[in-house]
Amino acid sequence: MPPVPLKIDTAPGALEGILIMRLSGSLTLGDLPKLQAAAKASTEPLVVLDISGVPYVDSAGLGAIMNFHLAAQKQGRRLAVAAPQQRIAALMELTKVNTVLKVFPTVADAESTL
């Protein structure tokens, strides 16, 4: 079965200065320009990347999330990842990405903690 194309929706968070970026579909090499453009367009101090609708992430997709995190950090902003599916959470643990990124079980948890 071919991967589902990535879709990115944005919405304001519960508090001012928070942007919720909801991803749905597979995050793969072919979809990196979409994520990179969305990352560049965001200016809020905190971006919560809601990946609950992402069933599959390849190594390039994981790298894109890390690049988003690093770019935000350089600008004095923060990126949090919320609601990864079990398979993606396991990948983040295996690759130790979860030791660099803030990963939360829900968007609400990310907003209230940060």
Image (cartoon, helix red, strand yellow):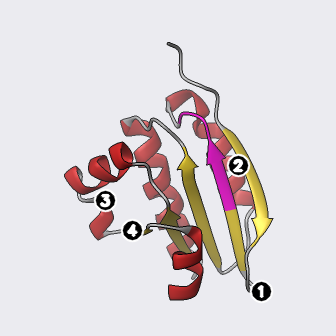
Residue type, mark 4 in image: Leu
Q: Nearer the viewer, residue 60 or 21?
A: 21
Q: Earlier in the sequence, mark 4 or mark 1?
A: 1
- In the image, is 3 to the left or to the right of 16? left
Q: What residue is shown at x 52% (from left), y 37% (from top)? A: 27
Query: On the image, numbered disc 3 is attached to which residue?
Result: 97
Asked whether the residues under the numbered discs 3 and 4 touch, taking CB atoms below 8 Å apart as contact, a structural biologist would say yes
Q: In 3D space, how far apart are the residues under numbered discs 1 and 3 (Cα atoms)?
A: 27 Å
Residue type, mark 2 in image: Ala
Query: On the image, numbered disc 4 is attached to which residue?
Result: 101
Q: Which residues are magenta?
A: 21-26
Residue 54 in the image, given as x and y percentages of width and height:
53, 42
Residue 24 is covered by the magenta coloring: yes
Residue type, mark 3 in image: Val
Q: Quadrant of residue 17?
A: bottom right
Residue 7 in the image, given as x and y percentages of width and height:
70, 39
Q: Earlier in the sequence, mark 1 or mark 2?
A: 1
Label 4 CA crowd tier, 10 Å (few <14, some 14–19, many 20+): some
Residue 22 is covered by the magenta coloring: yes
Q: Quadrant of residue 104?
A: bottom left
Q: Is residue 50 above or below residue 48?
A: above
- In the image, is 71 to the left or to the right of 58? right
Residue type, mark 1 in image: Glu
